[in-house]
Image: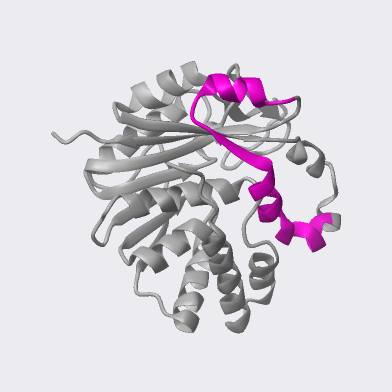
Amino acid sequence: MGKSQPWHIYRFAMKVGFAAICSGSIVNGLKQFLCPVGYWRFPVLGVVDQVLREHSFNSPWILDIGSPKLLSIYLAAKYRGVVHATDIQDKNIFGRYAAEFKSYNSTFGASGDYRVSLQDARQLEFDNNTFDIVYSLSVIEHIPNGGDSKAMTEIERVLKPGGLAIIEVPYASECYNTFTEESVYEREYNGQPLFYQRHYDDESLQQRLISASCLVLLWKRYFAERLPFEHYWGKIPDLCKVPFLWMEAIISAINHVQFTGFQAMHLYVRKHCGANAILLLQKPNK
């Protein structure tokens, strides 16, 4: 599978922003229009879209677990199945994202079924064997303790036999955790450092995600930066970055490179360069 440059999703994101502005949601619409697709989101969205194009699903049932919601809106509009977009606490899924799908539908026309709900990935409220596709992008790594493995068992449970799971997490040559001294998602800061996220290596990918889920690994891909853009971009105040946010996807297309083997990636990655891993897994037919 070759590297996919999802400029069609970039254009779709701008249309979502334009539709939101037309419907009266000026601030959210401008945010979406001015920053259609973020730096790390750009290569990953192309991978997810390519997976769906390469596997024929008739009116698929799709579950988004906590991922950035642009993709769920896109999938609902394009594949015309049922898309459940979930989050553990972000009530914007009701006030913003459901409204954005509705405004896009009103402006450009989309016949998909888009549903939103507050869900904990460790204890999903869906029945067994419900979804053709489950994806979770930049989410699993934030679940503390053994919650990432628990989430993977839930993903396996709600997938139909033969269904696919797409998981993206930060990657490093050796697994490590980072902590923060502020509230994180549903967890309130109480004076003690709180777990923020985990960077996986190949051993922890296998043990915590793949083996824990009992899903079959179809392939594993790595994305890494050619140059450490994110390390320095993150130091710039947000307000100063606003006029240049539209460029993040362009820089991503130039600066990210895809690998299929971790040895090659380790030889390539330079100091301060970020990397992530994307897993495509399948539930066995029983």
- Outermost residue, front direction? 2
Give percent across and percent down for residue 50: 42, 51
Q: Nearer the viewer, residue 94 or 158?
A: 158
Q: Is residue 5 left or right of residue 131?
A: right
Visual colour scheme: one colour
Does the image show residue 66?
no
Q: Which residues are magenta?
A: 241-270
Task: For the C terminus, give its image quadrant.
Answer: top left
Q: Quadrant of residue 219?
A: top left
Q: Nearer the viewer, residue 132 or 264?
A: 264
Taking the spot 75% from the left edge, 28% from the top edge, the residue there is 272
Asked if residue 5 is positioned above or below residue 17 in the image, the reply reads above
- Outermost residue, left direction? 286
Task: For the N terminus, give its image quadrant.
Answer: top left
Taking the spot 28% from the left edge, 57% from the top edge, the residue there is 60
Give percent across and percent down for residue 109: 42, 80
Main SS of residues in magenta:
helix
Taking the spot 36% from the left edge, 46% from the top edge, the residue there is 134
Q: Is residue 47 left or right of residue 173?
A: left
Taking the spot 35% from the left edge, 23% from the top edge, the residue there is 212
Q: Is residue 75 magenta?
A: no
Q: Is residue 148 left or right of residue 154?
A: right
Give percent across and percent down for residue 87: 48, 50
Q: Quadrant of residue 225?
A: top right
Give percent across and percent down for residue 71: 49, 57
Q: Is residue 265 magenta?
A: yes
Does the image show residue 17?
yes
Q: Quadrant of residue 220?
A: top left
